[in-house]
Amino acid sequence: MRFVHVEDFVHPDAGYQLNLLGRLQVKQGHEVIIVTSELTHVPDYLVNFFGRDQIHEKDEKYFKETGVRILRYPTYNWYSSRAVFKPGLQKFLKSLKPDVLFIHGEDTLTGMQLLRNYKKMNLPYVLDCHMLEMASQNRFREYFRKFFRKFITPIILKNNIPLIRVVDSDFVQKHFNIPLEKTHLLSFGTDTDYFKPDAQDKKNYRAELGLKDDDFVVLYAGKLDYQKGGQFLADTLLEKFVPKNSKNVKVIVVGTASKDDYGQNVEKTLSESENNIIRFPTQPYSGLERFYKMADIAVFPRQCSMSYFEVQSCAVPVVLEENEINMDRVSNKKGLIFKLEDKDDFRNKILQFAEMSDDDFKVYQENARKNILDHYNYIPIAQKFTDVMIAEYHRFHKNAK
């Protein structure tokens, strides 16, 4: 089948859900096209991590490597982290003749416009929702939710349009009046065949950086902006880590700070760290595997990203901030939680891992890998996404007869 995905922001070097889903759907035998925004007006905080340069060359390289075609449509601008596409997007999408149109983000401007024109588009839709309570902080959110409940929810429910929740939250029911039993729950995940522990790789990758087998390696790989807690991380790493067992703690930070004052302050603080941090610039998704494999633990100062799944798949325990999702992510000895914005507690949790006995630490490593294999192996998850899309294709055309 021909699947067309529409998403506000996509970068071929990213490790977002759609990058992985599209690649796996091609492996399943389907044709996959992603329609997304040109990068001209994309906010800096979204694109700085990956860069704007040579984007069409990178899109073409991604197509050659994965078989997924990325098509970019012009925008007027962005508002409240949402793309405002120029007129003609819906006509363009129809011209691609998709068997199923997957709309990523039912509450984006694009998603709502497509839903309002569902009958006119006359093709099967599948939706997904990534929203959590903690991420919905816009001061106009109550007005927006009221609008959505009145004008958008009835379209979804009346037409039985499949909505996939990718996080286990009651957000759509609580705020949009979409009953949970009317939705599908399919989690994020990762390719467990690619991201997996390997003792020899770990040894080799460490040797390339002059790291010893018994060094305790702490990894942060991600954005160094305010949203991801860049300065909080830098402040946490400023003072040298001295475990009681005299273990040698090494810190690796993978990520390029922005050129603004915030980013430069982060860089300055990192450069002044007593831990002699090993630095690497932002890496493409395919380049992160080596860092995950050489690490003992991975830390996420704020807003734990999808890389959580990759590091855990490599049997790497995590240190996460306290929130509604992360409590479950560290349960059953997969990681540790630190108090929100508490630098001292963040440091203590890192040291707790460094000082842990080998036997106890091994439990965390094994639980991390097992959790991903049991619940977040994206190969079968991607098939479930595809199953929903194929089922909707058949339902839609059966009802159209």
Image (cartoon, rainbow, N blue to C red):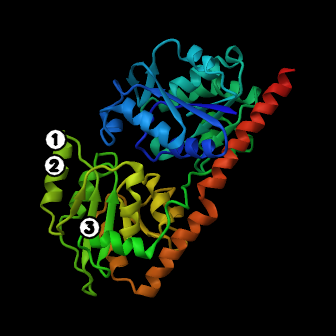
Disc 2 to disc 3, C-alpha distance: 19 Å
Q: Nearer the viewer, residue 153 or 256?
A: 256
Quadrant that contains the N terminus: top right
Q: Nearer the viewer, residue 368 or 156?
A: 368
Across and down, in percent, residue 79 comes to: 40, 25
Residue assigned mark 3: 251
Residue closest to the far front: 64
Q: Nearer the viewer, residue 350 or 342?
A: 350
What kind of residue is marked 3? Val
Q: Which mark is residue 309?
A: none
Q: Is residue 33 left or right of residue 315?
A: right
Please state which of the two labelled residues, at mark 2 or mark 3, is closer to the viewer.
3
Q: Are marks 1 and 2 in contact (CB under 8 Å)?
A: yes
Residue assigned mark 1: 261
What kind of residue is marked 1? Asp
SS at mark 3 in the image = strand
Can you say whether 61 is above or below 231 in the image? above
Residue assigned mark 2: 265
Mark 1 closeness class: few <14, some 14–19, many ≥20 residues within 10 Å: few
The numbered mark, 2 or 3, whose residue comes first in the sequence reads 3
Q: Is residue 375 left or right of residue 286?
A: right
Across and down, in percent, residue 257 comes to: 23, 47
